[in-house]
Amino acid sequence: MPSELERQIEHYLGELARRNASPHTLRNYRSDLEEFLQYFSRSDKPAPSDIDLWMLREWLAHLFDQQLEAVSVRRKLAAVRSLFKHMLREGVIAKNPARLLRTPKAPKKLPRVPTAEQTNTLVDSVKDNELDRPFPERDVLIFELLYGCGLRISELTGLDLDDFDSSERWIRVRGKGNKERQVPYGAKAANALQRYLEKRAPNKPGDRALLMNRFGTRLLVRGARGIVKQYASLLSGDSSMHPHTLRHAYATHLLAAGADLRAIQELLGHSQLSTTQKYTQVSLTELMAVYDKAHPKAR
């Protein structure tokens, strides 16, 4: 028989699903909350109302004993805080001790961003079909949309055929929380889209997916990641590159070319400007590197 804490976790996850949380968010929250449940199932299986601040601090210390990175601890703590807020709203607990937990500071890591020359060289190499892949037109389109539009990989694989306005060159993109935004695409992406549509097999009835896999169904996130990684590893020798690297490159190169930060925020679908501001740090880091290398007074 499930405990009260287990029932509340399932109820909360169900609410997240009803609020259209992304599959990625649901997967992470389920994993973190199941670990939380496992920790409190080792002894007396306390009811949610019995879990106090000291017990939560012991759980937090347990996470640090596992030598987890601060980023992982912060994510798990966010999931637990959200659960307790939910239980407070539902009247399951009278007060929320989780809000008193201190969030561990995470070291600020700037995203690694290839130069515009490096990125374009990679995309051009994909166009040359040097790897003799079975669906070269699809793969070119993947790179053109990731770098040319700054899409998240889940946004890319979620695109449907009717999300494109070819006359105005806009794409309807469904981002985190199923929020929609419009993103422009350029001539190279338009050409890649046209070549791909001319070559691809027709969709199965009722299927509107843009990107198809070898089985004739929607290309999934895992498959798209593998495509990007394979090209990056074999063409540029960089096995660390992933789809989000191209999103970082999109934003950084726009900023370096003089684009407004708030415009970049809208294009990326960031809800907070502070999330976009990390790209200003990347640009400043690059400028300092140039200064240190080139200016006679730098040393």
Image: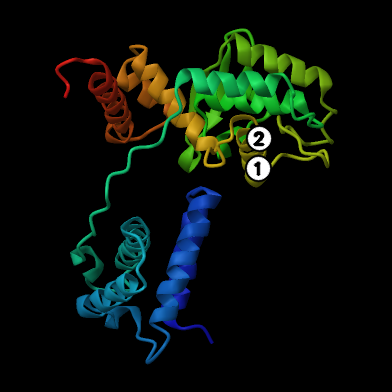
- Furthest residue toward left: 297
Colouring rule applied to residues: rainbow
Q: Which residue is mark 2?
A: 234
Residue 158 visible in the displayed image: no
What distance separates the C-alpha of mark 2 from that of mark 1?
Answer: 12 Å
Residue at image point 48% right, 58% down = 28
Q: Which residue is mark 1?
A: 226
Residue at image point 54% right, 87% down = 1
What is the count of numbered marks?
A: 2
In front of the other: 102 or 97: 102
Check disc 2: other Cα within 10 Å, few if <14, some if 14-19, many if 20+. few
Q: Is residue 107 above or below residue 255?
A: below
In front of the other: 40 or 298: 298
Tell me which amino acid carries mark 1. Gly
Residue at image point 69% right, 18% down = 193
Q: Along the horizontal axis of the image, is 146 left or right of 53?
A: right
Q: Along the horizontal axis of the image, is 141 left or right of 239?
A: right
Residue at image point 61% right, 39% down = 229
Task: Determine the secondary structure under disc 2.
Answer: helix
Tell me which amino acid carries mark 2. Leu
Q: Evaluate if marks 2 and 1 touch, with contact meaning CB atoms under 8 Å apart.
A: no
